[in-house]
Amino acid sequence: MTFRLDRVFASPWLAAGGCLLGISCTGILGGQDDGSPDDPEQDASVAPDGMPLHHMTASEYNNTVAHLLGTRLRPADGFPAFGAKGFDANVSALSNLSQVLVQGYYDAARTLAADAFSNEAQRAAILVCDPAEGAGDGCAREIIERFGLRAFRRPLEAAEVDRYAAQYADAQTKLEMSPVEAVQHVVRTLLTSPNFLLRIEVGPDSERSPGALNGHEIASRLSYLLWSSLPDEALFDAAEGDELATEDELRQQVDRMLADPKSAAFLQNFFGQWLGTRTLPSHNADATRFPSWNDEVKGAMLDQVNAYFESFTTGGRPWSEFLTAPHPESRLLEPLYANDPEGVREGFLTIPAFLTLSSRADRTSPTSRAKTILEQLFCVPMAPPANVDIPELGAAGGDEGPIGNVRQELEKHRASPDCASCHNVLDPIGLSLENFDPIGAYRTAYPNGDPIDATGVYRGAAFEDISGLVPTLVEAARPGKCPTEQLFSYALRRRPSGGDWTSLNEIAARWDGGTVADLVKHVVTSEAFRLRAKDKAR
């Protein structure tokens, strides 16, 4: 396992140490104060890189058509998955455009248009006038302009309106459709346009600030950041008046949008991808070993952790308490808490969702738990060493059958020079959580009867269990730079680069571990969020 600390934000005091082999761990949980990569070609003078062209993600597509059409259909659930890295970026849009995906888009458009026009309320929302009344295509043009604005997240150009109006006319004359059927035909076509399917930013600059994204582009960035969907009428109105060019307006919009029920998408997609909780519905535990495990408990875990995230977003709780805050109560999860000693259960690291997701179906995985903590909460990238076969736990000692004592098996791994240096770093963190079983219940013994030993030594300090290690981790997380990097990457669908690092450090310093809503405001008022890519600046 190799720690690649080229972009690390935490303070440098928490050294990994003992990582001397060429194939072993190197680096520290800490590092350069500016957080910048060690790359001479990327200096602090590089302008913001903007947002890459990318497809809507599956969740964005489903949310967008729901809010655009009022449908309950979720066609993107059947789209082929992308191999994108980081927050479902779906970058390299054209190279990812497979024939299967194209066919999926066309099939979905046909189904969605039919669904919308078969429902009176949905149809009425699209037909803002009656295309069968009056002469000419005036009503059809009005429908195209209004629906197109929302579908493309920007006003249609005159040539675009002309083209879709011509298609409307052709549908009546050549396809012998009624006026309403012709509108449905145009709607279906709009839903297959790249302007609908892709996040594209090529419009004119803001009237208030040369080189800045215009109001509709900012509105779209805000809505897909906080709602994973298209802007609402209030955002469209603000965009039309170019009001989103001011920092005060952006902050007010953030407060308004986070207070909207649609902000549940932010919890599900930002936190859910960053900290892995979005995968909980597909996670499995061995119900024969853990009889209390079922879909109802799984759902309760997800509800609880989302409520936990919400408390740091709109609930007023500062991020500095993320590793120490009390858990939201859950009746269905009470059995998991029943045997807790006083003071042992607090913060994200002991919430059942995290403990479950960082375990295997049949046993805990201290290595996975430690790796998740370091990678996700401290932005320490990790990768296995090349050309080294890392044996499964249990295989190192040649034992067969279920693992009884995980700690003893990890000691066998540490006996191997190829594994020792990494396990010396990871094991103290992971083993501190061994009192919690694979679904997060407190225990004092392994299934084979061996007593749990969660003690360890980290950076020279001994601890009895996770409650003794948390203060060390809290201090390491105090700068708040990893959440800043994660939110920046989610907002812009790309990793930070070049001059971004200076801005990220400044944002983290101003944020100072406040609420996530405060962090969102700092990110959306940054130049990286508001300006065009450097090669498009005017």
Image (tube, rainbow, N blue to C red):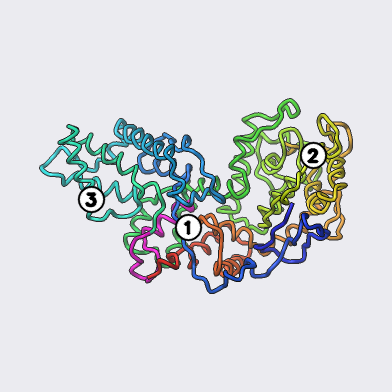
Q: Which residue is mark 1?
A: 254
Q: Badge 2 local density, few (<14 within 10 Å), some, or many (20+)?
A: some
Q: Is residue 447 above or below residue 125?
A: above
In-front residue for pair 430/263: 430
- Residue visible at 29% across and 33% down in the picture: 117
Residue pointed to by mark 3: 161
Question: Marks 1 and 3: in contact by CB < 8 Å?
Answer: no
Q: Position of residue 425 (x, y in %)?
A: 80, 54
Seen in the picture, residue 212 relative to 468 is either above or below; the reply is below
Q: On the rendered structure, is 300 left or right of 26? A: left
Q: Quadrant of the C terminus?
A: bottom left
* Residue mark closest to the camera, 1 vs 2: 2
Q: Which residues are magenta?
A: 202-226
SS under mark 2: loop
Q: Relative to the observer, which residue lies in front, 389 or 2?
A: 389
> How dense is the environment of label 3, judged by Cα within 10 Å: few (below 14), some, or many (20 and up)?
some
Disc 3 from disc 2: Cα separation: 63 Å
Q: Which residue does the numbered mark 2 point to in the structure image?
A: 393
